[in-house]
Amino acid sequence: MTDPLSTFDIKILEQLQKDCSVSTVELAEIVGLSQSPCWRRLQRLKDEGYIKRQVAILDREKLGFGLHIFAYLKVQRLSEKDRATFSRKVENTPEILECYSIFGEMDIMMKIQAKSMSWYQDFLMNFLMNLPGVDNVNSTATLGEIKSTTAVPVRGNLAL
């Protein structure tokens, strides 16, 4: 069982979500600890799974992915084999950023990064519609980005 998060743990998590490239020395200074206790806390947060991985966030537009498309899929009942195939194909497709099973009229929601509308049309017809069990796809293209973050609110209801 993990210990509850301390004020220092929360500060460490918040700082790493802003910039995970800081050294342990810099991190310790930012959160108000000496280096050794900061390093131990950081290791504990990793060991206990609070920190899954540390990554660089790339500029998708500079890499040619200027559109985000939300695709809603209606899927018929799948066998275990077809479900595994569906999941594997989704997992192995880097343009699919996120995929969720959902309640409601549709069954699956995907967030897809696209290079253009013509690229997405080809992706829709040659990939999405060919996934096991897919009966229908409704798509919504974004016009602009108002907010995009990977940060999780770690403070919650804690009085800090």
Image (tube, rainbow, N blue to C red):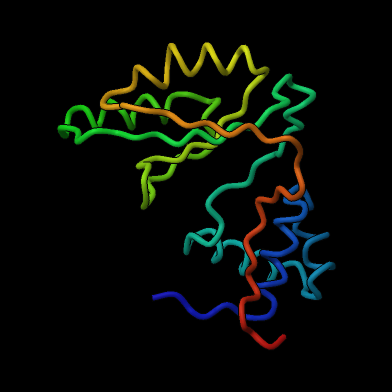
40 shown above or below 101: below
What residue is drawn where x is 56% and y is 64%?
Answer: 45
**Relative image position of residue 1 (x, y in whole percent):** 38, 76
153 to the left or right of 50: right
What residue is drawn where x is 52% and y is 80%?
Answer: 4
User: Outermost residue toward the bottom?
Assistant: 159
* Among the 4 quarters of the image, the one containing residue 14: bottom right
What residue is drawn where x is 31% and y is 28%?
Answer: 86
* Among the 4 quarters of the image, the one containing residue 27: bottom right
* Among the 4 quarters of the image, the one containing residue 11: bottom right
**Relative image position of residue 142 (x, y in whole percent):** 68, 35
**Relative image position of residue 105 (x, y in whole percent):** 36, 45
Q: Nearer the viewer, residue 119 or 26?
A: 119
Q: Quadrant of the C terminus?
A: bottom right
Tag count = 0
40 shown above or below 114: below
Q: Nearer the viewer, residue 54 or 144?
A: 144
What residue is drawn where x is 27% and y is 25%?
Answer: 85
91 shown above or below 42: above
**Relative image position of residue 67 (x, y in whole percent):** 68, 28
82 to the left or right of 26: left
78 to the left or right of 87: left
